[in-house]
Image: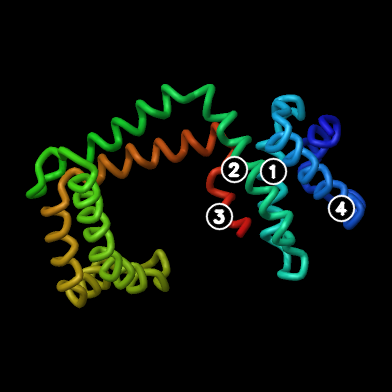
């Protein structure tokens, strides 16, 4: 099983023998999930399982509906993925906790009526306000993007001024949101860095799990 996972990881395009290899992969995933989740076998004995699962799930979700993973296999794949993620995260737990703490502290410094959060409810309220800012900003951003998207690089200064003048209301709305949402950029940067770090540690398996369902 370890040999299979290691060779599958190194193949890149996974073009080997199609159906037969997919069947073997499914069998190994089910067997590994049973051994790890039901008998306590150490996942590390099978090698870099997390990286393999990421590639396999990504490949399967790019295929047609007929070739998608069966429900029972999805369940076992999800269980194995969660175990793999936990193992990968364990070795970086303190670093990830520190990044999460920094990101959460950034939220509390936003200019809101809640000030510094004292409990989970207040923190969620602040986070909801940040989400509201992003929701409000999205329509005018899309409007401006569409206004410039179809243009060539040969647009004149006069053309640009005219478009901006035609969309003055959207620009004013974005300026208002920007003034109210001071500090959101820093919070966004910290959370993005946290997610990027999680992706690196888990070979992006964390974000692939929802695609299995």
Q: Which residue is mark 1?
A: 53
Pinpoint residue 30: horizontal percent, then vertical percent: 77, 46
* Image quarter of residue 48: top right
Circles 3 and 4: CB atoms closer than 8 Å: no
In the image, residue 56 above or below residue 134? above
Pinpoint residue 33: horizontal percent, then vertical percent: 72, 41
In space, the residues marked 1 and 3 are separated at their CA atoms by: 13 Å
Quarter placement of the C terminus: bottom right
Q: Which residue is mark 3?
A: 210
In space, the residues marked 2 and 3 are separated at their CA atoms by: 10 Å
Specify which label sits upstream in the sequence, 2 or 1. 1
Question: From this viewpoint, which residue is outermost toward the front?
Answer: 39
Question: Residue 16, which numbered label?
Answer: none
Q: Residues within 10 Å of mark 4 (few under 14, many from 20)?
A: few
Q: Secondary structure at mark 1?
A: helix
Q: Is residue 95 left or right of residue 80?
A: left
Q: Which residue is mark 4?
A: 23
């Amino acid at each position: 099983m370890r040999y299979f996972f290691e060779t599958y990881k190194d193949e890149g395009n996974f073009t080997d023998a199609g159906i037969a290899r997919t069947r073997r992969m499914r069998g190994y995933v089910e067997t590994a999930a049973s051994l790890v989740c039901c008998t306590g076998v150490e996942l590390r004995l099978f090698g870099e399982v997390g990286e393999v699962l990421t590639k396999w799930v990504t490949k399967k979700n790019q295929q047609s509906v007929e070739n998608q993973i069966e429900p029972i296999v999805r369940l076992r794949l999800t269980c194995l993925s969660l175990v793999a993620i936990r193992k990968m995260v364990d070795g970086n737990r303190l670093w990830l906790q520190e990044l999460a703490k920094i990101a959460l502290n950034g939220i509390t410094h936003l200019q809101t009526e809640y000030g510094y959060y004292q409990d989970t409810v207040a923190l969620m309220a602040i986070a909801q306000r940040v989400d509201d800012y992003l929701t409000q900003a999205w329509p005018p951003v899309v409007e401006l993007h569409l206004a410039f998207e179809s243009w060539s690089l040969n647009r004149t200064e006069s053309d640009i001024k005219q478009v901006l003048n035609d969309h003055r209301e959207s620009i004013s709305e974005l300026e208002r949101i920007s003034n109210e949402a001071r500090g959101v950029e820093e919070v966004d940067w910290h959370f993005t860095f946290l997610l990027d770090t999680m992706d690196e540690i888990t070979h992006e398996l964390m974000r692939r799990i929802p695609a299995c369902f």
